[in-house]
Image: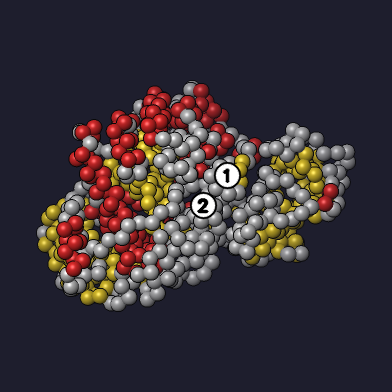
């Protein structure tokens, strides 16, 4: 993922037909402002809008997975960083509510020499802390809720003569009243479990491990809420289920180009911690292949796995595919079965690399070299499973042209990305998203006409990253906050996907949790962002059969039939701070005069939701009665109608 600006354009008349807006745009720029109006011809139905445009993307970056989806509360639980007497875990962002850990977050309790990092036969990684008697280690800034239970464990072994024991305590400040005593610590590592019920609701709780009797080596430590679901946060999963995203793309993003998928399989406690290859901080490898598949199953989504074509190669990609889809009798299928998953995962969607056109990407190479690698990787993967669907990493212009020419038989879809920044004018800010989608779609539509290599091919766009990206990182690295005005842009983007449904097969909002995400998660709570509310609303209520829709004035609108053609849905964005009266003319459908209306609105374009505060922005629902020929749209609003109708 790479930040970029999006082109702006003034659009007064919009239609589902692909090129209908071009001449109208130029004429409208010089014409007086038209009276707000929406005209729908429900008899003119376009290509179906795929539900896959509501898909999501998660990456090992910031607090998207660790601190977002994954329930682990401890930072650096495998001791990637050496514990020293100097406790300075954070860097320049130390004042942030969610700073990036840049040194050990474990504080020595006792003298500076009472904790040593032993590199000889470490439990995991490159060293293991050994704690002397009458000393300990603790970690601060943990989020607990009064009365809620938390479970944990530590892998421990005695590192010297004597009767060793460890006392584990949880609490706030100096009041660590909740304790568990771990005994029977022998000369071999054994997992010791503990459980607490928190006394306080706080973001400043601490976990303390104190050693008595004899030195103790601490292999790794874990602490999670007791209601975690296979290691995932129950509150985050509940919010993600509201989105009903059909596909999740993982593990990157820039991350994937330096990621060895084999680090994320096997015993979770023995998986090596690594430096994040693309971003900052540590990759704990707690959330790997099996965890991702379980995650998708928990929220009812299909998995999309991107393979490493940066520092990775075709043999690694083929082995990864065999691990997922191969029978238990195959080499890597046998390894999967040993990891607890006898049946193949049957992953259908496979992304081939990420943004390999960008010089920031690990393993970036010239186009003429990369097309060879793309085809090599796909050939090796299809030899393992010929039924997979492969998505090439495109970028409109010379790069996508080269892929379409040279790799057309080695891709089923082609990916495109875009991000938009902030614009001071509300309408211009909103307009960026649909303009960027249209620009991508029109380029590919023209490529189909101009490239003889594409004759007989139907290679559609997978918009695998799209969003706004600007503002301060409130929720950790790239954890930007979204506002009501951003929700308007995302809604207008869904409208544009409906207009371009003949060439856009899927879209993946980037990224789902915290990192430029539709969901924001604190240490204790999870909630939908303003943009998440829009995606939830359209996924649940907007139709799938787009019809020709023309608009005049400031509004952006698009209509679509439900799949059974019993409802005509209409989405409208009012990107102004005024109530707008809009005339509505519906042809080609008989409205019964009944239906429902949902609205997301407010007088402040900068209104936002925070997981630790009551929601400021909500979806409001009400019934609709009577035939509508005019609409009153609230300021700064997204409105969706579902009107009972017959063709």
Residue plotted at (52% across, 69% down): 613
Q: Front-most of 350 and 599? A: 350
- The residues bearing labels 1 and 2 have C-alpha atoms spaced at a distance of 13 Å
Secondary element type, mark 1: loop
Q: In this view, does 24 lie above or below 55?
A: below
- From this view, report whether residue 296 is shown above or below residue 585: above
Asked whether residue 43 is in view, the answer is yes
- What residue does disc 2 label? 64
- Crowding at mark 2 (Cα within 10 Å: few <14, some 14-19, many 20+): many
- Closer-to-camera residue (180/7): 7
Q: Which labelled disc corresponds to residue 437?
A: none
Residue under label 1: 276
Question: Which residue is found at the position 43% from the left and 58% from the top?
Answer: 469
Asked if residue 620 is positioned above or below residue 21 in the image, the reply reads below
Q: Badge 1: few (under 14), some or many (20 or more) residues near its Cα, within 10 Å?
A: some
- Place residue 264 in its image quadrant: top right
Which residue is drawn at the image coordinates 67% and 44% (left, top)? 80
* As drawn, 347 above or below 553: above
Percent x, y of residue 24: 17, 61
Residue 302 percent across, percent down from the top left: 40, 42
Q: In this view, does 98 lie to the left or right of 635?
A: right
């Amino acid at each position: 993922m790479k930040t970029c600006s999006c082109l702006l354009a003034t659009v007064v008349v919009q239609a589902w037909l692909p090129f209908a807006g071009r001449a109208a745009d130029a004429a409208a720029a010089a014409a007086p402002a038209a009276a707000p109006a929406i005209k729908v011809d429900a008899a003119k139905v376009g290509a179906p809008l795929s539900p896959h445009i509501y898909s999501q993307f998660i990456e090992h970056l910031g607090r998207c997975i660790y601190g977002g989806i994954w329930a682990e509360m401890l930072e650096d639980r495998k001791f990637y960083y050496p514990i020293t007497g100097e406790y300075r875990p954070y860097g320049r962002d130390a004042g942030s509510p969610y700073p990036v850990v840049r040194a050990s977050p474990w504080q020595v309790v006792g003298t500076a020499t009472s904790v040593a990092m032993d590199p000889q036969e470490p439990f995991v990684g490159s060293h293991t802390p050994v704690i002397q008697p009458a000393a300990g280690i603790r970690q601060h800034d943990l989020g607990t809720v009064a009365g809620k239970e938390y479970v944990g464990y530590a892998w421990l072994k005695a590192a010297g003569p004597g009767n060793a024991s460890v006392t584990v305590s949880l609490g706030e400040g100096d009041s660590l009243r909740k304790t568990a005593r771990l005994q029977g610590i022998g000369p071999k590592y054994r997992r010791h479990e503990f459980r607490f019920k928190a006394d306080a609701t706080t973001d400043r709780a601490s976990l303390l491990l104190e050693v008595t009797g004899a030195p103790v080596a601490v292999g790794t430590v874990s602490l999670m809420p007791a209601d975690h679901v296979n290691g995932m946060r129950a509150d985050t999963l509940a919010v993600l289920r509201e989105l009903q995203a059909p596909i999740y793309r993982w593990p990157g993003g820039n991350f994937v180009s330096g990621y060895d998928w084999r680090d994320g399989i096997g015993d979770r406690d023995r998986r090596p911690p690594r430096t994040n290859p693309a971003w900052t901080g540590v990759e704990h490898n707690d959330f790997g292949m099996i965890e991702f598949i379980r995650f998708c199953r928990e929220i009812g989504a299909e998995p999309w796995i991107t393979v490493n074509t940066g520092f990775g190669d075709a043999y690694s990609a083929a082995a990864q595919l065999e691990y997922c889809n191969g029978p238990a009798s195959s080499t890597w299928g046998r390894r999967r079965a040993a990891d607890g998953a006898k049946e193949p995962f049957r992953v259908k969607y496979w992304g081939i690399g990420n943004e390999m056109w960008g010089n920031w990407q690990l393993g970036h190479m010239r186009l003429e070299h990369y097309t060879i690698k793309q085809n090599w990787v796909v050939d090796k993967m299809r030899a393992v499973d010929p039924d997979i669907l492969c998505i090439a990493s495109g970028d409109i212009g010379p790069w996508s042209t080269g892929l379409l020419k040279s790799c057309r038989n080695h891709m089923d879809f082609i990916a495109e990305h875009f991000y938009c920044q902030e614009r001071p004018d509300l309408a211009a800010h909103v307009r960026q998203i649909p303009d960027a989608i249209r620009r991508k779609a029109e380029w590919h539509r023209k490529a189909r006409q101009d490239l003889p290599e594409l004759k007989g091919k139907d290679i559609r766009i997978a918009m695998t990253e799209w969003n706004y990206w600007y503002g301060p990182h409130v929720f950790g690295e790239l954890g930007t906050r979204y506002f009501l005005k951003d929700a308007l842009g995302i809604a207008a983007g869904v409208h544009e996907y409906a207009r371009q449904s003949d060439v856009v097969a899927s879209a993946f909002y980037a990224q789902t949790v915290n990192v430029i995400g539709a969901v924001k998660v604190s240490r204790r709570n999870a909630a939908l962002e303003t943009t998440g509310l829009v995606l939830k609303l359209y996924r649940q209520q907007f139709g799938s059969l787009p019809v020709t829709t023309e608009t005049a004035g400031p509004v952006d609108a698009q209509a679509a039939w439900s799949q059974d053609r019993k409802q005509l849905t209409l989405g409208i964005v009012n990107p102004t701070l005024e109530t707008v009266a809009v005339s509505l003319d519906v042809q080609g459908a008989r409205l019964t005069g009944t239906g429902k209306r949902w609205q997301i609105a407010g007088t402040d374009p900068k209104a936002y939701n925070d997981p630790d505060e009551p929601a400021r922005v909500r979806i409001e629902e009400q019934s609709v009665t009577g035939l509508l020929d005019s609409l009153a749209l609230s300021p700064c609003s997204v409105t969706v109608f579902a009107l009972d109708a017959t063709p």
